[in-house]
Image (cartoon, rainbow, N blue to C red):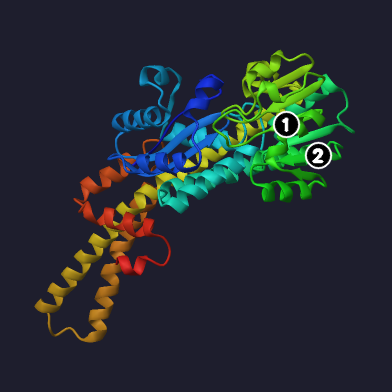
Amino acid sequence: MSVLVVGLSHRTAPVALLERVSVSGDALVKLLHDVQRDLHVAEAMVVSTCNRVEVYAEVDRFHAAVTSLSRLLGTHSGVPMEQLAAHLYVHYEDRAVEHLFSVCAGLDSMVVGEGQILGQVRSALKLAQEEGTLGPTLNELVQQSLRVGKRAHTETGIDRAGASLVGVGLTLAERVLGPIQGRRALVVGAGSMSALSAATLHRAGVTDIVVVNRTYERAARLAQTVGGRAAEFGELTAELARADLVVSCTGATDVVITADMVTPREMFLLDLALPHDVDPAVRNLPGVTLVDLESMQNGDADAGTDDGGRAEAVTAVRGIVAEEVTAYLSAERAARVTPTVVALRSKAAQVVEAELGRLTARVPELDGRMRDEVTQTVRRVVDKLLHEPTVRVKQLAESPAGDHYAEALRELFNLDPKVPDAVRRIEKSGPGKKEAGL
């Protein structure tokens, strides 16, 4: 079984297409289960954010699985395959590991280094765990990728070099409005991105913050954290008329802010939702500036960043990712040979016991002390003979062609393939289940 990634992102697809493919809520859960039920898939996880939709799966067939996962993305989005295929990318085995590590480290984000992706991958992991579509292979890979992402953000300046989408948006807002301290801000939505927006506004010195959400209680809780106030969703138009700066990020499938709800005047709207929360026609209103993911994708995402510092941080993070990928793949390859080594030692133990049984039958006059001495001697000889090849095969297994050494060992010693498979099942069952498995 091997890890496969099929997806599309802001690097390969326009925002309009990402909007159509993006899934959330019940639709995300359905896609997750449909992927996991595929004939060639053992485990599945889906990462769906404002600028990427990726399916991660443990598969037993490359080409068949790529076809299946691509088809499922097309079916769930309603996008014809001939239109979708040109924007899809595929990563397999080593490249899949490198891709996920790079994503979590912030190297593949629209704004390099933004930290929101860690929370988004963590949410995808939690959903897959709750829905039972995740197994030990993907679980370990994703957990490790989150550790790599945390290390990249802790050890380098990638966070400072590439601000979050919210930070970049506020930098653009200041270009239009001037200093945002003292301005009235409106946050539409109460999810994680809205919470980040409210916190960023508060840290920037904005003291007049209003939160509007379809569920008033959630709006009130978020507003309280930043010393703001909440308003009912029905008051959205009235709050828009009072706001200088609007940040909108809801999970709505339709437009939330239409052109007729906005009063023409100096005003800045930041739309971080996918699909769009704000009608693009708002751009035509005098004095009103609208920035959304599409406009950021087309060149505004790097506003306010230090190119020299960013380049240095990116280089450092790439070094961390390369180091971590090598370590992960070496450990993973070494682990693959363990069941074969166990099978070899198990066969050797069976041979020893059988020969000792024959010796006892042929020489019944051996007393207990002599029998124990012979037994220990035979076992020591076998252990010494097996020690060097088993240690060596574990070392060789860490190389890119490591699987071939385990295969050679199975062929040379005519090992029963059922034994390594049984060991793998016991190992994958996790702590506390080995005794039951044996």
Q: Which image quadrant is residue 273 in?
A: top right
Residue 223 x %, y %: 76, 46
What residue do we see at 52% from left, 38% from top?
325
Point out the image quarter for the N terminus.
top left
Q: Nearer the viewer, mark 2 or mark 1?
A: 1
What residue do we see at 70% from left, 25% from top?
261
Point out the image quarter for the C terminus.
bottom left
Q: Is residue 265 left or right of residue 236?
A: right
Residue 38 x %, y %: 31, 40
Q: Report the residue marked by disc 1.
A: 237
Q: Which image quadrant is residue 369 in?
A: bottom left
Q: Is residue 149 left or right of residue 402?
A: right
Viewer-closest of 98 and 292: 292
Q: Which mark is residue 72?
A: none
Spot the residue most to the left: 362
Relative vertical location of residue 162 with respect to residue 47 in this rendering, above or below: above
- Lower position in the chain sequence, tag 2 or tag 1: 2
Q: Report the residue marked by disc 2.
A: 209
Residue 67 x %, y %: 32, 28
